[in-house]
Amino acid sequence: MTHFFIETYGCQMNKAESVSLAGRLTAAGYIQVFSQEAANLIIINTCSVRKTAENRIWGRLGFYKKEKTKRDITVLVMGCMPQRISEELLDKKRGVDIVVGNFHKDKIPAILAAHRKGRKDCYVDEPESQNSEAFFTETAPDELNPAKAYLTISHGCNNFCSYCIVPYLRGREISRSSSSIINEIHKLTEQGVKQVMLLGQNVNSYGNDTKDITFAQLLKQIARETDVSWVKFMSSHPKDLSEELIEVMATEPKISKWLHLALQSGSTSILQAMNRKYTREDFLQKIYKLRESIPDIILTTDLIIGFPGETEQDYQDTLSIIKEVRFDDAFMYKYNERDNTLAQKTMGDPIPDEIKVERLTKLIEIQRNIGLENRQAMKGRHFQILHERPANDGTGRHIGISSNELIFLYDGSDDDAGKVIDIEATGVNGSTLTGKKI
């Protein structure tokens, strides 16, 4: 009997794909376990967007290579790393048995069956050969919180930001049909799902390739035609954030009043070098419109520090826009080269690492203070949260996440599982809000 364990790295889309794969393997007779010690099939779903993610995965592969000297296990590596460096992964010294790129994930049960018969161990194609069925297989409720589900609505990216490897690994943008999305949400809500997170490399451009419906129209249809309680989505590209989408977010109660909008830099010259296709002023105008239409919106972002050519003034432009917009949270990174991107081929990596670290450290401090001040200002406000899990602090308290993606620590109980709860914010505990039931 084969017991499988899936480790997932990187984006929420990888999480969705792992959940979908678990369902297909279970249907094929495999048994899912939630610790590597109990598994004889290890599946690692990988990320190549940043070097740090790959470094973590190399460390795990070293661990499993040692494990193979102690017991009989099969190691399958899937996703973006095989798509990028399949031969290096299959080097015998790595201890990897099978690699599966981004365009064969739907076939993993058949691939495992073929492997047992001694057939090929490398399944990697070029993006041009992509098959949409590989991306839009049926999903399932989240393993750890069955009231939530991730649903991929588009795959791939047409933007080719100069620093980004994603279009080369996931191919051009493909949108799932709106009817398929609606049908999938109906199935999920019948299983008790209350929150659906719609996923894509750029959800805002959903439907551009198929001329089906726009993303804003899709959100409106989901809100009005399904029984789901909350709809969240990521990621959004600023250049494709339409007034139609802002209006739907403002007027449809089921649509989360949270938006993750990746800024990357506050300098127009750096944004142009990144091929982001918007200026600092464009971004700010959209923020003003969002705040005018949705005064209580929660805004989060991504930022890259130390991009090639970033001057001290460019860096100061980023600090000033952070202070002006006052994001509630941000993912902040120092630039690192990714192979075959335009930036790597034409710009190099000229900024010394110590300058990157210094700039990033200051940015993180400023943003953390802004986030803390924003959360402190929420004291006394009422929110709805979806129970997530018991807290790990030994107090018996529980974790819940609000409809606008704020994390709450509150005095709950196991009976709250799967429920939407009314709560009042009472304070701040680090990056988490504290609350009490109303």
Image: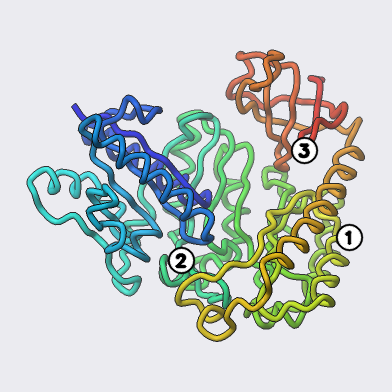
Q: Position of residue 364 (x, y in %)?
A: 78, 53
Label 2's element? loop
Q: Mark 1 = which residue?
A: 323
Q: CA distance from mark 3 to mark 1?
A: 18 Å
- Foreground pick, 85 / 145: 85
Q: Mark 3 = which residue?
A: 431
Query: Which quadrant: the N terminus?
Result: top left
Q: Position of residue 338 (x, y in %)?
A: 50, 70
The residue at the point 91 percent across, 30 percent down is 380
Judged from this view, the residue extending furthest toward the left is 117
Q: Earlier in the sequence, mark 3 or mark 1?
A: 1
Query: Which quadrant: the C terminus?
Result: top right
Q: CA distance from mark 2 to mark 3?
A: 32 Å
**Is residue 28 at least partly visible in the picture?**
yes
Is the C-beta separation of discs 3 and 1 under 8 Å?
no
Q: Position of residue 75 (x, y in %)?
A: 27, 43
Compared to residue 371, the image places residue 5 above or below, namely above
- Foreground pick, 437 / 127: 127
- Assess disc 3: are there few (<14), some (14-19) or many (≥20) residues with their C-alpha within 10 Å of its C-alpha: some
- Foreground pick, 191 / 392: 392
The residue at the point 74 percent across, 30 percent down is 408
Instruction: Give amino acid for label 3.
Output: Ser
Compared to residue 129, the image places residue 113 above or below, namely above
Q: Mark 2 = which residue?
A: 156
Number of the front mark, 1 or 2: 1
Label 3's element? loop
Compared to residue 83, the image places residue 308 above or below, namely below
